[in-house]
Image: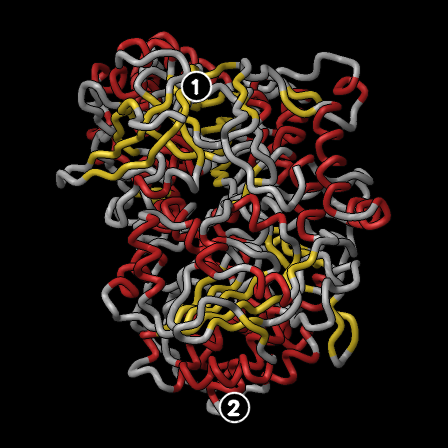
Amino acid sequence: MSAAEDPTDEHLEITPPKTWATGVPAVRHALQYSLSQTSPRRTMLTLLNINQAKGIDCPGCAWPEEAPGKRHMNEYCENGAKHINDEATSHRVRREFFEQYTIDELGRKSDYWLNQQGRLTEPMVKRPGSAHYEPITWDDVIALMAEELRGLDSPDEALFYTSGRVGNEAAFLLQLFARAYGTNNLPDCSNMCHESSGAAMNETLGVGKGTVSLDDIYEADLIFVVGQNPGTNHPRMLSALEETKRRGGSVVAVNTLPEAGLMRFKHPQKARGIIGRGTVIADQFLHIRAGGDLALFQALNLLLLEAEDAAPGTVLDHDFIREHSTGFQEFAEHARKTSWDDVLTATGLTREEIEQVHERVLAAKSVIVCWAMGVTQQKHGVPTIREIVNFLMLRGNLGRPGAGACPVRGHSNVQGDRTMGIWEKVPQSFLDSLEREFGFTPPAKHGLDSVDAIRAMRDGEAKFFLGVAGNFIRATPDSEVTERAMRRCRLTAHISTKLNRSHTVCGDTALILPTLGRSDRDVQASGEQFVTVEDSMSMVHASWGKLPPASPDLLSEVAIISRLAQATLGGTPAIDWQEFEADYGTIRDRISRVVPGFEDFNRRVAEPGGFRLPNPVNEMTFRTPSGKAVFTRNDFEAPQAPKGHLILQSLRSHDQWNTIPYAMDDRYRGIRGGRRVVMVNPEDIEELGLTGTQTVDLVSVWTDGSERRAESFRLVPYPTSRGSAAAYYPETNVLVPLDSVADISNCPTSKGVVVRLEAAAWAG
């Protein structure tokens, strides 16, 4: 399909889902997509440098690399190859493009089409009342934005949004600028994915990050993979799980859909993955109902307590519980009230299946629980993760080899952005460090997260929006409300490498600010620069661009933020923004004095592979009010679907990264040529009185009586768990109200949407 074509679902094909992942087809698809974007030479250059020391950090997922010396020369997966060459594309969007298309016309194009137009090449502005973007100089861009910021009635009328693609240096400067300007309004993509993880783990362990390393994954006796699909979202995790299996460990997969990568994995860099049958990853698959994970871990915790009763002193880790935790007695009393009827109804599992997992737990000396958005984007996501922490603490599976908590982040530097201070609720200790280093008093009042930022724009309380990378409009819930809210702003600006839907949803004035990509060489006044990132396991390392920039008119994210800060603040406080733009090492020097764990940053990150940040949990230090890990009591919760309804979860297709599809296929699930599909168990289809692959509307229903509709989805009979359904986002974001959020974390509930399926009025 050429970049000029805007695909539809008219050629949708459905075949049986695959029972294994990767192998030769993955290599073929990676090369096909790469070569469709750029030349063989550029493809070779990116693929030989991706995830290598002194190379380009993959702009895709945050799964860690092997230590230098252990890395394969092809240290990337199929999706990583597609991500890097999607960014390194030779296609260009020039000013003539914006003369050809009005903003309304671009708004009617698909996410796929917009992305396929290529790299942005010069800054563009949409003036008030204009139907088109037109060129603007960088000097005028900076002056326009600075004037708008200085004209706001309050700094809290400005929003500074960040995506996980942003490097540490730009993230640190953005939060420094926002706080020097006077606001903590720093919403980011974490708010919409792993915010529940941070909320639960900060409360129970005193740190919002995972506690395990790649070596721990290899050494674990038992790994739970809960609510995630490694084969699509972070395929290199399958290589790590294969090593776990090779060393004698086992894996339990917990998911509403059978995922090919967790069934059998063919490693494309090993002979057994090319000519053999590959490796069975999941020793046991729990085909759980949507939202049943809390009930599952409550049942496992009850079984552990009962096993300890039957054989005192042999099951629980009493030393850990006594010396390093608090709240155990209250937790245990509450856990013993768990109802098996509730558990079996919520999970859709049998007691025998759960007891089989329990036996695996008893036999394992070290256990890791990995989870992703299948857990975090539930109404009860925070209690579920707290219950997972309870489960790990009962047998002391924290702070020792092969054990721990592993939230698997979905974007390359989303964890690093939070470490750098991109957080609307950053601790006072961080603000105090900023004050000591830079000589101004940052605002103490908490700012707005992503959901509250939309509410503020909707209500006219926020008037300026700057998005640094990402695609805010398509990443957020309640699409129509979000778009109306964005259009109420006086100025919207997006620092981007490629076109996306957010550029078509404009404030009175709108700006497109084209920036260097991860793969582009970044040369500033002091010479060639690198940026740093932090992966999902707290490894911090450098990323060096290798390709000539897509246009001479691109600025780096660091340069854009530095120039905007200088123009807006006018030297008050006295921060040398020009020095930061000229030499990113000076930014890292300041980070080393502000952010714990980054001491001597420049020297340590120059080491091959970088360095790992300390995790206090691994030193049995818990930064909670009590100084100990906290057992919690979590009330039983599970989503309830009235008769004739299902629980819908949104997910990505295999040929998709975040909000952007690279193709209209999902080959592991057997879906080709379309995205407006809803996967439903055949027995549920029959029970609902529907047939085959008819076209239906998805209607979400909410406790306040409101409904939302997503039209014309093709039914796909699929082995989802009974009562559960699945469909792609961002097409289904319209179904999730802005106010449907997880308790405590405010994370949108995209994995627990109660829907009914109605025969579509038009089924063309």
- Residue 560, can we see it? yes
Across and down, in percent, residue 10 comes to 50, 28
Quarter of the picture containing the N terminus is: top right
Q: Dot 2 surroundings within 10 Å: few (below 14), some, or many (20 or more)? A: few
- Residue 314, can we see it? no
Residue placed under numbered mark 1 in the picture: 716
- In the image, residue 283 sits, relative to residue 478, either above or below, namely above
Mark drawn on residue 574: 2
Q: Is residue 552 left or right of residue 169?
A: right
Q: At 65% across and 84% down in the image, what residue appears? A: 579
Q: Is residue 298 left or right of residue 135?
A: left
Q: At 52% across and 54% down in the image, what residue appears? A: 500
Across and down, in percent, residue 509 comes to 42, 73
Q: Is residue 90 left or right of residue 331?
A: right
Specify which label sits upstream in the sequence, 2 or 1: 2
Secondary structure under the numbered disc 2 in the rendered image: loop
Which picture quadrant has residue 276? top right
Which picture quadrant has residue 138? bottom right
